[in-house]
Amino acid sequence: MVKKVLSIILWVVTGAALITLFVFGRKVYLDTPLKDVRVVAENKHSGFIEYDSLTAHIRALCGIEHQTAIGRVDLKKVSKMLNDNLWIAQSAAYIDLKDTLRVSVKEYDPVLRVYNHDGQSVYITRDGYIIPTSPHYTPHLIIASGNYQFAMPVKNSNIADSLYHDTGLAEALAIAEAIEKDTFLKEHIGQIYRNTDKENEVIVNNLPVQVILGDTCAVSDKLHRLKVLLEKYQGTSEMEDYKTMNLKYKNQIVCTKK
């Protein structure tokens, strides 16, 4: 019986000692100054995010220069700053065992730039997110312009939102993605255009012909027919005699001459 009591007492004392060591160790850790900030770009596009500036901002928030203790670093403030950045799609921040704040950042990846009827522009990602343009970076993307009637968003939105249902943005993205999948089309189609009848057109480089797609139903097939025609008459003056090429009709291209 005495042995059992002594064993229990030993376990209790050991447990208390471990808890004391843990509390002491945690206090020492939380009182340790944060040593550094490291920002890692998961998909850097060399432009939207100025990583030196972002790192400097985070260092200032964390008080690196003032040797702020780890326990006083406001990670919520850091996360909010990252979430408020309109070019950052995802981010995460944590302090590692080397007393360094590790920040991972994933930028939005746009595939299209769209100008509205007022001449203002936004980028659209593959997932339909609308992000603002950058004052110091302009990626080389297909352009859409014309009768796109949308207001400039004050924060990142998505073209699936009801606010953008009749703006033509979803159709512009569908066309851009179809063009992007084909190297030949990417080289020959410079712009997407939405006319006053809300029909979609594409502008072929160095070809003064109105190319009408209509809606985005079977858009890949429509663009394939255009590709076949361009490949057949490439380097000739044959198509220069045409005023319009209409791809709206199934399995055909209806052309009108000048």
Image (cartoon, rainbow, N blue to C red):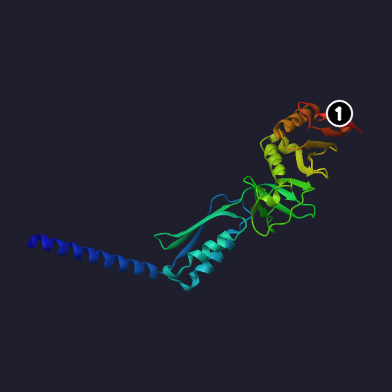
The quarter in which the N terminus is drawn is: bottom left
Q: Residue at x 23, y 63 (%)?
A: 15
The quarter in which the C terminus is drawn is: top right
Mark 1 lies on residue: 238
Foreground residue, 237 or 147? 147
How crowded pointer 1 is (Cα within 10 Å; few <14, some 14-19, many 20+) is rated as few
Q: Residue 12, how many percent across, how many down?
A: 19, 64
Q: Residue furthest right?
A: 258
Q: Residue 224, how many percent across, how many down?
A: 72, 30
Among the 4 quarters of the image, the one containing residue 11: bottom left
Q: Residue at x 87, y 33 (%)?
A: 240
Q: Residue at x 55, y 63 (%)?
A: 80
Q: Residue at x 15, y 62 (%)?
A: 8
Q: Residue furthest front?
A: 162
Residue 204 seen from this side? no
Q: Judge left or right: residue 64 versus residue 193.
A: left
Say how many tags the image has.
1
Q: Judge left or right: residue 50 versus residue 242.
A: left
Residue type (three-letter) at the residue carrying disc 1 = Glu
Residue 62 seen from this side? yes
Foreground residue, 252 or 63? 252
Q: Judge left or right: residue 212 versus residue 97.
A: right
Q: Secondary structure at mark 1?
A: helix
Among the 4 quarters of the image, the one containing residue 22: bottom left
Q: Residue 245, how many percent across, how many down?
A: 83, 33
